[in-house]
Amino acid sequence: MEILWNDYLWPTIVIAFFTVVVIVVVLMAVAYTTYYERKVMGAMQLRQGPMTVGPFGLLQPFADGLKLFAKETIIPSGSNRVVFLLAPMLTFFLSLVAWAVIPFDQGWVLADVNIGILYLLAISSMGVYGIVMAGWASNSRYAFLGGLRSAAQMVSYEVSMGFVVVSVLLCVGSLNLSDIVMAQSGSWGFLNWYFIPLFPMFVVFFISALAENNRLPFDLPEGESELAGGFMVEYSSATYAMFFLGEYANMLLMSAMLVILFLGGWLAPFPFLEFIPGVFWFFLKIAVVLFVYIWVRATFPRFRYDQLMRIGWKIFLPFTLFWVVLTAGVLVAFDWLPGSA
Amino acid sequence: MIISGLAFYLFSIIAVVAAVMVISARNPVHSVLYLIVVFFNSAALFVLMGAEFLALILVIVYVGAVAVLFLFVVMMLDIDFTELREGFLRYLPIGLVIGLILLVELFVVIGAWAFASDAANQIAAPAPPADQVDNTLALGRLLYTDYAYLFQAAGMILLVAMIGAIVLTLRHRPDTKRQRVAEQVARRPDEVLDVRKVNPGEGI
């Protein structure tokens, strides 16, 4: 009995409690990301954004959420019912499950696995299934086209993203996310972070993240002006809400990956600011990256599909391949390889 | 240890059931989805064995890329299901023979472990003990040192296969419109624009 309690039950309770905490934090962050996006877009377009629900419109995300869940769920009669309902659940589930390995601060991580970055790549590469399944199961041409576009797009950009991750890993010598952050610490503050030596990879990763999340200017799977909403065309109410939440949680996840790989994770930008807890810096950096996401959305027109594929395969892939070789060459030539001693 | 035993049976039962569903599902898209479930559970079995690097590579490569392309092709195909069913009995004997051969080979491999337990020590470069290095490092050390040539050879075979696939599908269509970015960037306003003064009430 003692063994059962100490070895199985108590750890399960602890991990379940922390999982719930992380999920609540992520969902709150998602809710306020939508608010943030609307406010920033409003400011960029000389509007005010949400204003009426609560002070400064702060309760707007909850009003929207309640509205969505109160509506009727419509399942098209020609659809493939099981797959149709499975697709939004899968998207939502995958967008939350990835947060298990994200370190919010020193030691603040659910599962400190030593292959954390591979786990993140695996989860984000599975994100395409929710969209493809939704596109196919809806039995609608618009949705199907959106699903096909998304499949090709996400597979293409994952390749260059993988090479970006490899070049960071070469500098760190570990696949553990906490190790990746700690490798960027030092007395120089933000000058130690990897976005300076690996600046081109930082840019490639950010653009690939936009494509991976189907965000403007690469939101062709949704393409509301030509596909009327793409793979989400047939979804309503709670199923739509799950796609929406999943998409924004993925956006936060990609920002978190960018922060961990290039912007020093929870580290303070200046050594004298280290008294502020790391989790504050982590979320502040995510907010800065999200601002750029929204900025890009407000600035750029949508790409044409062949242009999107051209950038992915003909520019990013050769360039990241070259940069991986260059990084490895420099590390070996100057004997900077971590753990080579 | 009970938990990992239970987890093993859970994952392997799901994997076997899903594998049966791959060949018995009526809809080919469902078959591919079941195949993904099989991949995923095999990855979970790798994790149980302590081979977490292999598990995640399996998920990234097979689930994240290969199965996506499968799904892509199967969704685009216009398949007549009844026609597909017809050949089932005709191909059954061949399928059974192939399955039997694979089963015998499995027995031979596993039998070698059981009967000659020191055979694992005879290979050129034994893997370092699992508790000393993590398996990403262990794999890297073996692949890039003792097995470097074989690794390169595998890469060359994949390269040849890739070039072959491209050559088979490449068609030159002269009427395709292509975007030449360099030309567009090199265009100057004075070459393509003609600014004229238009008086009110007159055309050009």
Image: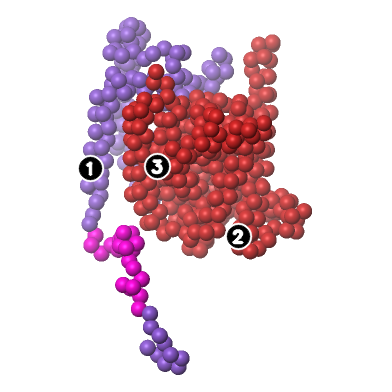
Chain colours: A red, B purple
Label 3 packing within 10 angstroms: few (<14), some (14-19), many (20+):
many
Image location (x, y in percent) of residue A55: 77, 53
Asked if the residue at tag 2 contacts the one at tag 1, i.e. Cβ–Cβ closer than 8 Å, the answer is: no
Q: Residue at x 68, y 24 (%)?
A: A13
Asked if the residue at tag 1 contacts the one at tag 3, i.e. Cβ–Cβ closer than 8 Å, the answer is: no
Question: Which residue is tagged 1?
Answer: B164
**Secondary structure beneath label 1:** helix
Label 1 packing within 10 angstroms: few (<14), some (14-19), many (20+):
few
Question: What amino acid is labelled 2 in the image?
Answer: Met
Q: Which tag, 3 or 2, sits closer to the chain's start?
A: 2
The correct choice, above or below, for A328 with respect to A220 in the image is above
C-alpha separation, residue under disc 3 versus residue under disc 2: 31 Å
C-alpha separation, residue under disc 3 versus residue under disc 1: 23 Å
Please state the chain letter of the residue tagged with numbered disc 3 in the rendered image. Answer: A
Asked if the residue at tag 2 contacts the one at tag 3, i.e. Cβ–Cβ closer than 8 Å, the answer is: no
Question: What amino acid is labelled 1 in the image?
Answer: Gly
Q: Residue at x 66, y 29 (%)?
A: A18
Give, as a single range, the part of the protein colored magenta: B173-194
Question: Which residue is tagged 2?
Answer: A44
Judge whether residue A100 is colored magenta.
no
Res B64 → quadrant? top left
Question: Which residue is tagged 3?
Answer: A160
Question: What amino acid is labelled 3 in the image?
Answer: Ser
**Secondary structure beneath label 3:** helix
Given this view, does label 3 or label 1 mark the residue nearer the observer? 3
Image location (x, y in percent) of residue A269: 58, 37
Please state the chain letter of the residue tagged with numbered disc 1 in the rendered image. Answer: B
Judge whether residue B184 is colored magenta.
yes
